[in-house]
Image: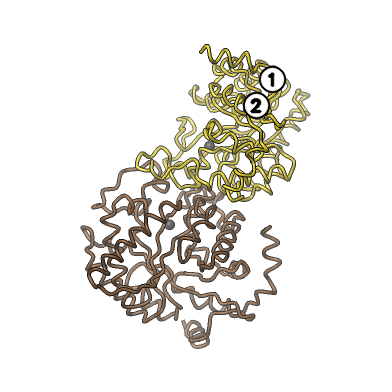
Chain colours: A brown, B yellow
């Protein structure tokens, strides 16, 4: 803990960039408002993944627009201008909520979840979007949609966001006209069409946990499959590289918000690929900032990319 | 049926190639020995997918080497020199066999299945490999391994095949020294490392059913997801193109053995990509052969590949 304080003193206020001036933001993931304290203590540059599910999980019925608005506003205000990327409802798979009445499924990880539920139940999704846009007037909020697999889904989400903004305009409600709308890239489909998706959104965040499950066809919670679950698999690293290239060719930023982002053995790799942001548990923030500031990208880039064969 | 006879008369013995001389074999899939009649009736060039599971499914206990050998030999002999690609045991997921005592799983499609079981239970796998190699003396057998995700798995399979061949050599048992060993490319991981896999095996067969499930993260048997299951998704077509390129750069052939192969709306696309073989239900064989013989690849190739963005 003294070590951590020392690190904090040493890094506080310093830019998160390499010895040769490449910036990579280190943001934090949070799963409830209570985690915001840890985000600030660890001087994270922002919140790269705010899991909005807890608002739904801790209630017995759908949270109202007002209830959600208050939570989002509170986080935005507490972060005082630092970016807060809020992920829209990501339930289904292993996250079940009684009042959603989700069907029993053979393969829930390949099932009815996240944006699929939201597109199927626009009244639920619209309530959340209204709360998010209204809260954007109080800080630096970005909206992120999980489990995208197609252009059509993104366009449907954007159309709904457009409707919400028009409603707010008509009502004279305040919101930030520049709110970024991004998607999680966590299905192989999204990786393969990332060039087209990048033209539709403001940013990507690569969700390595799900992406790894789908790419390797391995449920990581299945103990029989430990020997087949390799988070460093070249297929994953090449997928990330491909997504970064698609993003940058289209002028948008790209982060990583899965567990892989916190693996210090890969920080140089992510820098070499050009990843713009890592979002990790608050406890990993300072260590990664230190790592970034000690790296010289030009020294490692060529060997890393050659090794990956890309 | 008269139409089919007409088609058969018209195509029998004719090469399966386009107007501009590009060959694409049309093979058949079979799920039991009883299907071989349909293969011959429809004059398929060979069997591109022999699902060996039925030998296990119709018994109460593990089939012996001798029992398996007789089935494989019979198919090889009946096909009289035409290629017979036999897929090694592909159980798990929705195919359960009591005596295998498979664990109950949260997500069986992302679970303990196919080659994962075989590598975990080498005695079961070795018995099948011995039967396959011995049967290869009686016809044109190729061995195909499903659900590959890594180089390590392929190398382990090859080591086991090597051991089996050495055993047969020592025993003086006959087998075809040139038996091809290939893999199914049906996980996104295999697609992404297909360049490396192609250096290790003799052929690829793209299993579009599973590949589509994993790529889109959609269980195709889940009725709630119909609107999200798009077998023509650009991610799938680009994956296929990528695998074909990897195969050809390394001098091996590549087929498709999922349902997509039988879709006549895609035959020109597969020809444009350079797919070497389609393996489909016997009933689709003649229609596809006709389609191939009516296509001029040079007329359609550029537009198709440009449209795909590859
Ligand atoms: Mg996810
Ligand atoms: Mg399969």
Image quadrant in which the C terminus of chain A is located: bottom right
Is disc 2 in the same subunit as disc 1?
A: yes
State yes or no: discs 2 and 1 in contact (Cβ < 8 Å).
Answer: yes
Report in which chain the residue with disc 2 lies.
B
Q: Nearer the viewer, residue A144 or B148?
A: A144
Question: For the residues carrying marks 2 and 1, which lies nearer the camera in this image?
Answer: 2
SS at badge 2: helix
The correct choice, above or below, for B115 with respect to A165 in the image is above
First in sequence, mark 2 or 1: give its number: 1
Please state if A174 lies on the left or on the right of A201 as rendered: left
| Residue receiving disc 1 | B14
* Mark 2 residue's CB less than 8 Å from ligand 2: no
Q: Quadrant of residue B251?
A: top right
Q: Nearer the viewer, residue A213 or B256?
A: B256
The correct choice, above or below, for A88 with respect to B255 in the image is below
The percent position of residue B194, horizontal first and vertical second, equals 65, 47
Q: Quadrant of residue B147?
A: top right
Residue that extends furthest to the front in the rendered view of this protein: B299
| Residue receiving disc 2 | B293
- Residue A221 visible at all: yes
Crowding at mark 1 (Cα within 10 Å: few <14, some 14-19, many 20+): few
The percent position of residue A128, horizontal first and vertical second, equals 29, 63
Please state if A85 lies on the left or on the right of A129 as rendered: right
């Amino acid at each position: 803990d003294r070590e951590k304080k020392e690190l904090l003193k040493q890094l506080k206020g310093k830019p998160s960039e390499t010895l040769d001036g490449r910036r990579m933001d280190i943001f934090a993931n949070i799963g409830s408002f209570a985690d915001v304290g840890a985000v600030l203590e660890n001087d994270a540059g922002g919140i790269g993944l705010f899991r909005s599910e807890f608002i739904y999980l801790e209630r017995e019925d759908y949270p109202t627009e007002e209830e959600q608005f208050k939570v989002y506003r509170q986080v935005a205000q507490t972060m005082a201008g630092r970016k807060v990327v809020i992920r829209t409802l990501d339930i289904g798979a292993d996250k079940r909520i009684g009042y959603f009445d989700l069907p029993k499924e053979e393969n829930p990880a390949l099932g009815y979840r996240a944006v699929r539920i939201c597109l199927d139940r626009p009244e639920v999704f619209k309530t959340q979007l209204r709360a998010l846009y209204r809260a954007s007037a109080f800080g630096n909020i970005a909206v992120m949609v999980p489990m995208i697999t197609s252009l059509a889904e993104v366009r449907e989400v954007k159309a709904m966001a457009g409707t919400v903004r028009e409603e707010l305009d008509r009502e004279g409600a305040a919101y930030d006209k520049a709110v970024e709308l991004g998607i999680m890239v966590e299905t192989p489909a999204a990786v393969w069409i990332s060039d087209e998706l990048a033209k539709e959104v403001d940013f990507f965040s690569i969700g390595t946990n799900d992406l790894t499950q789908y790419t390797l066809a391995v449920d990581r919670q299945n103990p029989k499959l430990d020997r087949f679950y390799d988070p460093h698999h070249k297929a994953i690293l090449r997928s990330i590289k491909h997504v970064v290239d698609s993003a940058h060719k289209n002028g948008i930023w790209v982060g990583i918000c899965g567990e892989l982002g916190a693996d210090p053995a890969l920080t140089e790799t992510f820098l070499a690929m050009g990843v713009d942001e890592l979002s990790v548990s608050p406890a990993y923030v300072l260590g990664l900032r230190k790592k970034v500031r000690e790296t010289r990208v030009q020294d490692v880039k060529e060997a890393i990319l050659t090794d990956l064969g890309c």
